[in-house]
Image (cartoon, rainbow, N blue to C red):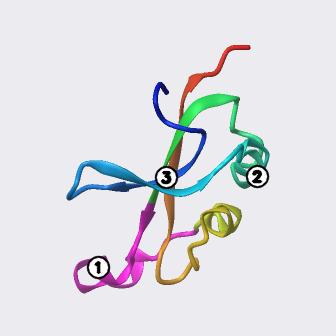
Amino acid sequence: MDGVEQGLYRYLPLDNGIFSLGAGDFSSRLNDALFGQYWNAAIVFIWTTIPFRMEWRYSAVSHKVIQAKMDAFLGVDGRDEFTVYAAPVERNLP
């Protein structure tokens, strides 16, 4: 992606911007968290959720089985916030 350093970012929806959580090459750790499904992607979108925001409506079914490795990679606790989905986009060609 032009103009954006390699790293981990959080999307800020109210500002329609991004916030850096750390610069660097996270591809090896990300591949491990994705159980080998990183596929040398140019970008990976990862969605997390905060269950209590949905529990009022969906009760106990709001908690799903989550990838603990991805939660650890992102630094979320897996209880109050956890990974919902990851989508590798476009392959980085050598």
Give the percent coordinates (x, y) of residue 27: 72, 42
Give the residue at mark 3.
Answer: 9
Q: Residue furthest top?
A: 94
Residue 8 counted in the magenta span: no
> Where is residue 11 shown, x and y percent of the image?
37, 53
- Which residue type does callout 2 highlight? Arg
Main secondary structure of the magenta stretch? helix
Question: How many residues crowd mark 1 within 10 Å: few (<14), some (14–19), many (20+)?
Answer: few
- Which is more foreground, mark 1 or mark 3? 3
Q: Is residue 77 left or right of residue 94?
A: left
Q: Are marks 2 and 3 in contact (CB under 8 Å)?
A: no
* Residue type marked 1: Arg
Discs 2/3, front: 3
**What amino acid type should be assigned to the residue bearing mark 3?**
Tyr
Which numbered dot is residue 35? none
Q: CA distance from mark 1 to mark 3?
A: 22 Å
User: Which residue lies at the image location 45% right of the left edge and 63% below the top edge?
Assistant: 48
Q: Earlier in the sequence, mark 1 or mark 3?
A: 3
Q: Which mark is residue 53?
A: 1
Q: Earlier in the sequence, mark 2 or mark 1?
A: 2
Tell me the magenta residue range: 48-65
Q: Which residue is mark 2?
A: 29
Q: Position of residue 80 (x, y in %)?
A: 47, 83
SS assignment at label 3: strand
Secondary element at image label 1 = helix
Q: What residue is drawn where x is 64% and y is 21%?
A: 92
Q: CA distance from mark 2 to mark 1?
A: 29 Å
Question: How many numbered marks are there?
Answer: 3
In the figure, 46 relative to 56: above or below?
A: above
Instruction: Please report the residue visible at 60 percent of the width from the left and 64 percent of the height from the top.
Output: 74
